[in-house]
Structure formats: structure tokens, C-alpha cells
Image (cartoon, helix red, strand yellow):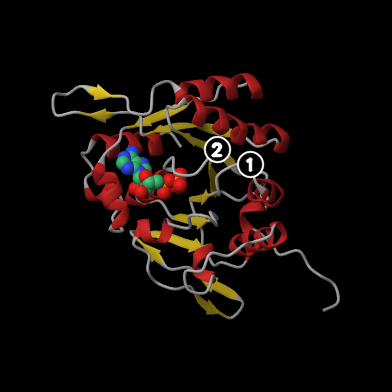
Amino acid sequence: RGDVQEPVIPFAQPGSRTRVYAVASGKGGVGKSSVTVNLAASLAARGLSVGVVDADIYGHSVPRMLGADGRPTQVESMIMPPSSHGVKVISIGMFTPGNTAVVWRGPMLHRALQQFLADVYWGDLDVLLLDLPPGTGDVAISLAQLLPSAEILVVTTPQAAAAEVAERAGSIALQTHQRIVGVVENMSWLELPTGEKMEIFGAGGGQTVADSLSRLVGAKVPLLGQIPLDTRLREAGDSGQPLVLATPDAPAAVALSAVADRL
Ligand code: ADP
């Protein structure tokens, strides 16, 4: 097709006012997607224009958690993303046939991410959140190339082993010269009916990651919040109603909204 033109990514243009946050974790199952959708819903509820890119090929659970069951449509050369709760969302899962697990190679992922950023009609966003696959994989590197101004938000559990891998995921920002906006500790404790906080996954992981990353990048990386365990958070995700909207006074929702305040 002759010359291959690099697609234009509006968020990478000088003067773009969209703040882009890539939500990263060391391993799966720590609540990265849950945190992403609740931050998105919380920011949208304040009247901000918000988009989410679900780039987690292993999970791609964001549309379900947001209740975005529409399909993307094509208008001329642009992809129109479905939206739910005021959040525009595009997911790698929307482009895979059925529910079959796809083995994506690095270059395909790079291309998919590029398309999500360049060919999706996002409009004038205040905030774009990207739910990255767990680990220090190809997608994080691709993102850094496509969108060096994206800031990294690291999600971990309090567990030492999880904190270690989260640190490694965060440390990729050092190589890519991206800013780390902060750390969110999820599943911090379970509040018992007696009021006692039971630390099911241990304690201290979030602060440990924040301190290590601060040392690594030579700047303060704050612990932005600690999100308790709450069965309503999972139920809210399963039913497509993020907890911050479904039960805004639940402690986990209050903690998530406080993180959104600090973005
Ligand atoms: P990840 O994106 O890191 O793989 P998810 O957001 O998919 O993790 O969360 C994994 C599972 O744990 C989901 O079923 C989710 O509903 C549940 N979950 C996440 N955070 C919490 C929490 N604070 N309390 C209760 N359940 C949670």
C-alpha cells in the first residue's frame, strides 16, 4: 500500500489536555480492573469526560464490570466506542470472536493498542485510563512508545510477594521515563462485624511498593489509598454497576473515590 503512515494518536499530540493513566500490576487477580472501572466511574460521575482502554488480553473484564454490553460501531474510518455510566470503553475482548482465548503476539498487541488510541473516536477526553495486562509485558513497552506521557498507577495487594512483583512492574517506568502517579493497595483488610480489621493478605505491601518506587525514581511516589475487601465490590463488578455508583458510602467506595480525587 505504498508508504505506511504512522497513525496519529491525539493524546500524544503537543497540547493534548487529556490526562492518561495506565493501571499496572505485577500479577493478575489483585483488582487492577476493579480499581480501573471504579476510578473511571467516579471521575465520570463528577462530570469529567472519561474513556477506558481495556488492554488486558488475559482478563478483558472491563466492559462487563462497567455494564458496557454494546458493540463498537464503525463510522467511516473511526471506531465508535460503546459507553456506560458516562464512560466510553473499548476492549480487546470486543474484537475477538466469541469468548475464545486468543494467543496474541507482541506485534499484534502493539497494533491493537495503537488502533485503540488512534482509530477510536474518543472525543475531547479529560481522562483516559488504560487497564494493562499484569506483569512487565509487551503492552507496557508499547504504551511507553505510543504514549510516553502516560502516567503509571500501580495496583498491589498487601502481600509481600505481590508487592515485589508490583515493584518490578512499576520499575519499567524508570526505563521508559514515565511518571508513576502512585500506588493503590487493594484487598487491604476485611472489616468484621465486630469492627475489627482482619488482614487476610498481610499488611504493608502498598507502602513498601510506594517506598521502593520512590527510591528507584528519586521522587515521591505516594500510596494513594487502601481499598478494603468487600463482597459488594465484587457483586457490583459482576452486575455492571461499579461500587462507587451502586453503594457510594461503602468504605471501599469511599476509598476508591478518594483515590480518584488525588489523580
Ligand atoms: P485483576 O484485574 O487484577 O485481574 P480484578 O479486578 O479482575 O483483578 O479482580 C479479581 C477478582 O477479585 C474479581 O472477582 C473482583 O470482583 C474481586 N475483587 C477485586 N477487588 C476486591 C475487593 N476489594 N473486595 C472484594 N473483591 C474484590
Quarter where residue 202 is shown: top left
Q: Residue at x 31, y 33 (%)?
A: 228
Residue 248 vs residue 202, the one in the foreground: 202
Name the residue beneath numbered marker 1.
136
Are there few (<14), some (14-19), or many (20+) residues within 10 Å of tag 1? Answer: many
Residue 191 vs residue 116, the one in the foreground: 191
Q: Residue at x 55, y 72 (%)?
A: 79
Disc 2 is placed on an element classified as: loop
Q: Is mark 1 within 8 Å of ligand 1?
A: no
Q: Amino acid at mark 2?
A: Gly
Say the numbered circle drawn on residue 26.
2
Q: Amino acid at mark 1?
A: Thr
Q: Please state the horizontal and vertical placement of residue 195, each as a whole percent of the image.
A: 17, 24
Query: In this image, 195 relative to 106: left or right?
Result: left
Q: State yes or no: discs 2 and 1 in contact (Cβ < 8 Å).
A: yes
Q: Please state the horizontal and vertical placement of residue 151, each as a whole percent of the image.
A: 58, 40
Residue 38 in view: no
For the N terminus, the quadrant is bottom right
Image vertical order of residue 170 relative to residue 15, above or below = above
Please report whichever mark, 2 or 1, sits nearer to the chain's N-terminal start.
Answer: 2
Quarter where residue 226 is shown: top left
Q: Please state the horizontal and vertical placement of residue 255, each as a whole percent of the image.
A: 32, 34
Image vertical order of residue 216 relative to residue 109, above or below = above
